[in-house]
Amino acid sequence: MSTTIISVVVVYLLVTIFIGVWATARTKNTSDFFVAGRSLGMFVVAMAVFTSIQSGFGVLGGTGLTFDAGLGGFVAGIGFAAPLGFVLAWFLAAKRMWRLANLGEVYTLGDVVERRYGSRGVRGWMGVAVALGVIGYLGVQVQATGVIMAAIFPFGFTTGAIIGLLILGIYAVGGGIIAAVYTDLFQGVIMVGVSIIVVFLAINAGGGVLNITETLQGSDPALASPFGTVSALTIACYLFLFSLGAAGQPQLLTKFLMIGDTKELKWGALTSALAYLLTMLLVAGVGLSALSLSIRGEFPQLETPDQALTTFFVEFTPAILAGLGLAGILAAIMSTGDAFLNLGAAALIRDIPRSLNVPVRNELLWSRVVVALLLVLSLLFSLYLDTLVALLGVFGWGAFAAAIFPAVVLGLVWPRATKQGAIWSIIVGIVLNFVLEIGARNDLVLLPEGVVNGAFALAVAIIVFIGVSLVTQPREDKTSPEVKRVFEG
């Protein structure tokens, strides 16, 4: 690794630490820690939404899966579905969540569902779902951090993951969500710019689009097909999971609680979706080019497909651009990790205790303590689930989607939804995801080949939510007039 690349990465990390220190000075209370004082504008929120979704899972894992399975492995199944999820979330949930936030101290998804359903039980189960999903999804960020740090600096995966977590802890513990969103803004702009440049370098390195396509088809025609080597059923599951599922990701939904004015919502969906699509060009370009180069024997041997992106940056791009690219990915991973740490702290310190009517004094202090504990748990979880970054991300994504999309998004657009429907959909979403994933880790296949566990769990959770809500309709509508106004368009 060249001195130039290392220097650029170090400067980049110092800037993120500076943002964290600045954010810590601005974080005075619980509102600042969880929702940035509800003072953010459209562009900051839109970039934070984009980068919280397009992190190590999307860029690093997506490139690895494209390198491993061809075009359909990630791009066709996920790259065009997630932006649709941005649009769904923006138009179905954004304004309604903002209205709920105006009814009082609404900082978390637990606050949202308790206001919506008038139930502490829904708040408690939502807190459990978010806490469990956060540990799983943080494992993705830890694993991606280890891959990037090991590619840049002269130490192994585990050491790199630990050092990355220590840097993350410096600003996550103090700066809360303010540190996350402004780090998101900083690295998101850089990531989009680098993506636009690198995709042309990738195509050139592979010898042009025609040469790349001919190489892939010569090796295996499926690699250049719309589905790659992934089955059509799996692609359909990805499209379902990553469109509706994107609208059920808590790191996306909670950003709507931070908007200062609904006027700021305009153009937000387009901004975040366009930024995401531009970075998907990087995923497709580098993944396919690296694969064609590897087939021709012109790409370094990799221990795992997750190294495809970092290897391409180091071997096939100018040092400064490689440094910016690697640093941008690392910052994306860490800022997303910061957002998840914030969500986990909110669930464990605010949502679950309040559902049990157990007050927590000094929520800000205890939230910072829990953030530190979650960093340790996520490292252990990542080391246990030793698999591709993208596949580990599908697990975390599925757990959130199944537990949150029905209760929150559907619950905000369907006035007849009940607290019983919300509770049972959350429970089913949690249990199904963990049973299916643990079964898969132990070679116990419970679903037909090609069916994605998270997609199946999401579909079942939606059916449970609608079915239970229909059979538990109250004799008398006790919804408050303030909450009823939330359902207005």
Image (cartoon, helix red, strand yellow):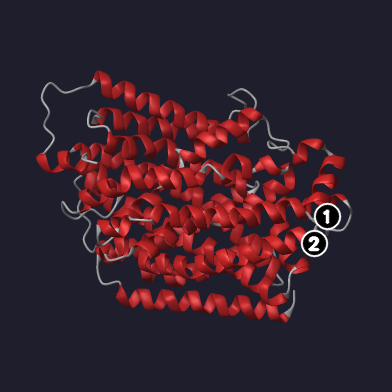
Q: Amino acid at mark 1?
A: Leu
Residue in front for this viewpoint, 329 or 114 = 329
Quadrant for residue 246, please give it: top left
The numbered mark at residue 205 is 2
Residue 208, x across and y down, in percent: 79, 56
Q: Give me the C-alpha separation between circle 1 and circle 2.
A: 8 Å
Q: Residue at x 12, y 43 (%)?
A: 482
The numbered mark at residue 293 is 1
Up the image or down, 192 lies above or below 324; here it is above
Residue 352, x across and y down, in percent: 29, 46
Residue 380 shows in this picture? no
Q: Are marks 1 and 2 in contact (CB under 8 Å)?
A: yes
The mark nearer the N terminus, 1 or 2, is 2
Up the image or down, 90 lies above or below 286; here it is above
Q: Secondary structure at mark 2?
A: helix
193 left or right of 359 in image:
right
Up the image or down, 348 lies above or below 231; here it is below
Quadrant holding the N terminus: bottom right
Q: Residue at x 47, y 30 (%)?
A: 457
321 left or right of 81 in image:
right
